[in-house]
């Protein structure tokens, strides 16, 4: 069985990318009789080697650079609990609104007072620059909100992120709900 650490290592991606580029170049130039050339002021390449250089270079354009991935993977992650409050428009109780970390992973529901805690949201160490959440509730307008560093406070000792401002959900107007239910 292959070790998962090997599969996540950037050198693994580099080798796979290299081999796939080589196979693609072989098929294009051996069987499909393609041609390519690169002319630079200090060097030139033609034929299959030029095709390989082009294919291999373009593969990094369509995927993230393996060097960038390596730098991210080498960083440790920390899990934080995100606390906040969501209030419903014209409601006495504010429980039951679903809060989802974006992209979708962690999720929770609000309490009676609208407070919520998203548990164990992972951040790269020293890279907490922002996060997004989505708040959904039936008959209310769904919102997605991105928070930057000015909108939350971090308690490194307790690993808690607290959203400073209250988020408010507005009711969908009755006319729109009736029109939607009639369609």
Image (cartoon, rainbow, N blue to C red):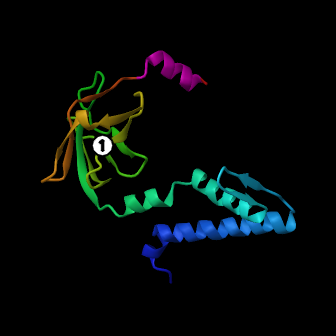
Residue 47, image x, y percentages: 79, 62
Q: Position of residue 62 (x, y in %)?
A: 60, 51
Left or right, 46 with reference to 41? right
Magenta span: chief secondary structure: helix
Residue at the spot 12% in from the left edge and 54% down from the top edge:
157
Residue 115 in view in this figure: no
Q: Is residue 1 above or below residue 132?
A: below
For the residue pair 42 and 31, the one nearer the viewer reads as: 42
In this picture, residue 15 sits left or right of residue 137: right
Instruction: Give the extent of the magenta segment.
Output: 172-182
> Residue 77 appears at what percent x and percent y?
30, 59
Question: Going 24% across and 31% down the picture, which residue do you hit?
Answer: 93
Left or right: where 50 falls relative to 75: right
Residue 173 among those drawn in magenta: yes
State the residue position of label 1. 129
Q: In this view of the protein, which residue sits in the foreground, 35 or 45? A: 45
Question: In the rendered image of this protein, does residue 131 appear above or below residue 164?
Answer: below
The spot of residue 167 in percent (x, y) is 28, 30
Residue name at image x 20 percent, y 33 percent: 164
The local crowd at label 1, few if under 14, some if 14 to 19, many if 20 or more residues have their Cα within 10 Å, is: few
Decide whether residue 108 is among the magenta residues: no
């Amino acid at each position: 069985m292959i070790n998962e650490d090997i599969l996540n290592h950037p050198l693994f991606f580099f080798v796979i990318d290299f081999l796939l580029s080589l196979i693609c170049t072989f098929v294009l130039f051996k069987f499909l009789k393609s041609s390519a050339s690169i002319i630079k002021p200090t060097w030139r390449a033609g034929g299959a080697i030029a095709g390989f250089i082009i294919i291999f270079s373009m593969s990094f354009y369509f995927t993230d650079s393996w060097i960038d991935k390596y730098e991210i993977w080498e960083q440790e992650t920390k899990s934080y609990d995100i606390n906040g409050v969501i209030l419903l428009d014209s409601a006495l109780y504010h429980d039951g609104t679903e809060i989802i970390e974006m992209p979708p992973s962690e999720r929770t529901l609000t309490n009676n007072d609208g407070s919520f805690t998203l548990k164990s949201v992972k951040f790269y160490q020293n890279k907490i620059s922002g996060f997004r959440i989505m708040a959904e509730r039936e008959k209310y307008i769904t919102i997605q909100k991105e928070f930057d560093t000015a909108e939350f406070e971090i308690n490194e000792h307790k690993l808690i992120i607290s959203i400073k401002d209250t988020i408010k959900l507005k009711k969908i107007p009755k006319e729109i709900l009736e029109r939607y239910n009639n369609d």
